[in-house]
Amino acid sequence: MADLLYTIKANTPRDEIVKLLREHPEIKFVSLIGIDMASNDTDEKIPIRMFLKVMDDFYSGSAVQTDGSSVVLPGIATINNAKVDIPIDPNVNWFVDYNFENYDEATNRPVGTLRIPSFLIHNGKRVDSRAVLTDTLTYVKAQLLELFHSHPNISGLDVDGREIVDIIFTSATELEFWVKTPLDEAAIEEMSASQVMQEQYWQRTHGAVRTALEQCIIELDKYGFNVEMGHKEVGGLKAQIDESGHMTHVCEQLEIDWRFDNAVQAADNEIIVRTVVREIFRANGLEVLFKAKPMIGLAGNGEHTHIGLAAITADGKLHNLFTANNPEVDFMSAIGYGAIMGILKNYEVINPFVSATNDSLNRLKPGFEAPVCIVTSLGHSPKMPSRNRTILLGLIRDVNNPLATRFELRSCNPYTNIYLVLAACYTALLDGIRSTIDSSTRELLAELSKDAGHEGFYLERDRKYRSEKDVFEDYTAEERDKLFGKPPATVWENMNAFDRYPDKVKVITESGALRDQIIHAFKTGALLRWRTELIARILPEMRKIVRRSRKIETDFKTDQDSYNWNKIAKLRAELAKDSIDNKSLFTRLTDALNAGDYETASALQVEMYDKVEELKHLYDAYERNLI
């Protein structure tokens, strides 16, 4: 299989594309990848002969249309105005997805599908997530070039702004995921103990998990992803071996990291990586879980997102714009300080794109290094880079490698819409750079490091934005909320930030790409999924927990058993039992959701989670005391 075609490079001429496809008749289909507001990627099977016959129509978008009401574009593509055109994007890599379970008889090779990243156009406007990021970067680049040319002497940067001819937006993601034997129930308590005792992190993989991980790394490198590492993560449990020598009860957490790329390409790469990983593990009889919090009580799946900014000068050299001219004296250049402050100051309206599901917010809770506080860490001195894992937005730097300086946003998860997150971050970054471009690095360090209650020239007065401490151990919950802002507990609270912070919305919508229409569509879709999941999935699961918490009959009881059961019975009734005069919490939550009273529903959701957790702890104590 060494001569299979895996990638068609960005901007390959059309005649060269035709030549490559003629040379690889095993590639039977074309699939156009458009990304909707929920980060879903479209997938079709279009015969390759159709693509070759009317290639120009695929470039223009007239070859393929879809019913826009069938993808997540609420308020944009309506049922009475649903037509959406899908033009392909020639400016990024195209990938061939091979089906190793279906071989072409003529070539004895696996059947391939050429997956082409594309845009979604409705009423003449691009309305998809890829377009939002692409158009945002075009705008931000033009603004930065104009800014640098008019402010040539930038503090802490050894580059004359007038010499900058191009801006490069670099980004990288990494993938954490749980892998398990299908249908096996996870032993949560045992895995929690293993996690606390750090028995899994970076341990050796075995059997089918090892095979699948190795196959993933080899396969991803064929696409040119330059995988840097695959390893076990913090969560997991040792598998068992059955009578035939096969591994059973597999349940462990893995991570795969690969090389950075330009921002749009990096987001596209992630789509393909998830597909390859899922298919290879499935072929090895294993189920992959990309959810942010697949199992409550255990480590969730993060997806740290790296954000960089570089410039090309007239002499052709590449310069990291965040790196200080003297990295042993300054943490960053003035551009770096402005960029990180822009993201932090406007994070409340970036966060909805980061965490748009119940699952994502289940992960973002204090503990397990969950990044919930809007705060950064730089390090105690420029000579010693920080690796504080309790903060939201980290500064990653290497004193000996100027090109390594970047920011790490730690709150994303594998189902975060990275296109929209990067679009919002780069626009927020522009706002910060504009506001700080004339300041010295000393002034900017003071601004970023100021205490809450001190007036700043850019950052908010009553907030603290930098801490070198352990955010969860060295501050109380009340102190964290006061200093760094109270994190949203529900999807409704997070989406409501668009209404609470209109000035910050203006910042991220400045380019016109991430416009009000897109935000409205994203918010509407997120709230619809939140409501539906609560009614159809979460509430039924909560009812099961209540019903399983039954009274246990035994001949040997104590007054402690009666006391425990009475508390459990009362809590069960509060949660799930209606009477003529009083409705249960479950009923009130359902009624509020059906009535569209989302503020009440949000508060009841928080109350429900608290009471169900209390019930689980009470029932555990009750059950343990019975013999």
Image (tube, grey):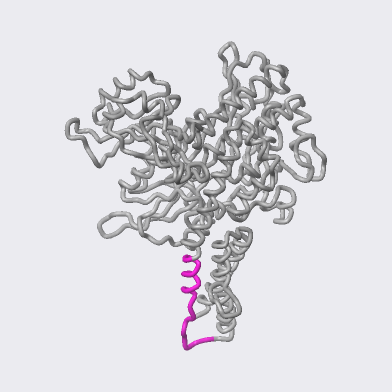
Please identify the residue farthest to the top as the structure is shown: 315
Query: Does residue 366 appear anywhere in the picture?
Result: no
List x then y, in percent, for residue 239: 38, 56
Instruction: Find the magenta span and give its range.
Output: 540-557
Q: Is residue 242 above or below residue 321?
A: below
Q: Residue at x 71, y 23 (%)?
A: 156
Q: Residue at x 46, y 61 (%)?
A: 537
**Nearest the camera: 613 or 471?**
613
Please identify the residue farthest to the left as the structure is shown: 106
- Dividing the picture into quarters, in which one does residue 277 lie? top left
Q: Residue at x 60, y 32 (%)?
A: 512
Q: Is residue 33 left or right of residue 356?
A: left
Q: Is residue 155 above or below residue 101?
A: above
List x then y, in percent, for residue 71: 44, 44
List x then y, in percent, for residue 217: 38, 37
List x then y, in percent, for residue 111: 26, 35
Q: Residue at x 61, y 29 (%)?
A: 405
